[in-house]
Amino acid sequence: MEYYYHGTNQIYNKGLDIMIDIIESGGIKSNNKRSGHSIGLYNGDDYISVGKWNKEENIDFSRFNESCFYGWIFWCPTFIIDPSINAIHAERIIGPVNPNKGRYSCFVDEYHVKDEIELDKVRGIALPFSLIMDNKDYLLKTLKILQYAKLYKWDVYESDMFLLNRVDKQETYYDTKYKKRN
């Protein structure tokens, strides 16, 4: 199944904080729905950025600057979202844009969702488990997120360059005793 992905942040502790905030607020929200403050990104104030992998493409990490997967999704805490959401493909443009005049991105594989993605559309999460070693704060935040994942019955994956293969094959992170949904 071709899911959408919403990465939180590449600075892992911050990414975990954002993931917890999203879960506790009840959904992934646009700037206007969340705080009303603009941060001046391509998606503007009323849209949420998500990525969608094109399975026809080979994984090529040299494309770091043109793909949200290579530059963002693979390496940070990520929500895996049902493909039934209403997402608009953003046109790739480098440079300043007016997000009120169309859907634009600096990435070729970015989509925008208006206002909010509710938690019932989340099918799983991906976390960079390899960073737990010697980081108590990271471990505690990860455990909190795993409790939410169990509550919502989300599949759990390791966030790294093999993420897409695992999600495609539904190979969940069994060390946490999470089972595949039927």
Image (cartoon, rainbow, N blue to C red):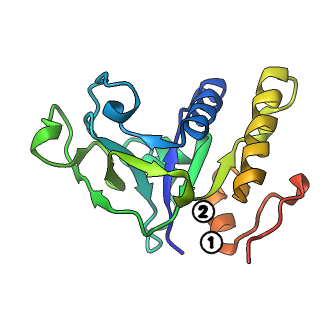
Q: Nearer the viewer, residue 74 or 7?
A: 7
Residue 168 got which mark? 1
Q: Nearer the viewer, residue 113 or 164?
A: 113
**Number of marks in picture:** 2
SS for callout 2? helix
* Res 42 visible: yes
Residue 164 got which mark? 2
Location of the C terminus (image quadrant): bottom right
Q: Is mark 2 in CB contact (under 8 Å) with mark 1? A: yes
Residue 181 lies, in percent from the top left, at 74, 71
Q: Residue at x 73, y 45 (%)?
A: 148
Q: Quadrant of residue 101?
A: top left
Q: Quadrant of residue 35?
A: top left
Going by the numbered disc 2, the residue's amino acid type is Leu
Q: Nearer the viewer, residue 99 or 161?
A: 99
Q: Quick check: 167 left or right of 41?
A: right
Residue 142 lies, in percent from the top left, at 77, 36
SS for callout 1? helix
Going by the numbered disc 1, the residue's amino acid type is Asp
CA distance separating discs 2 and 1? 6 Å
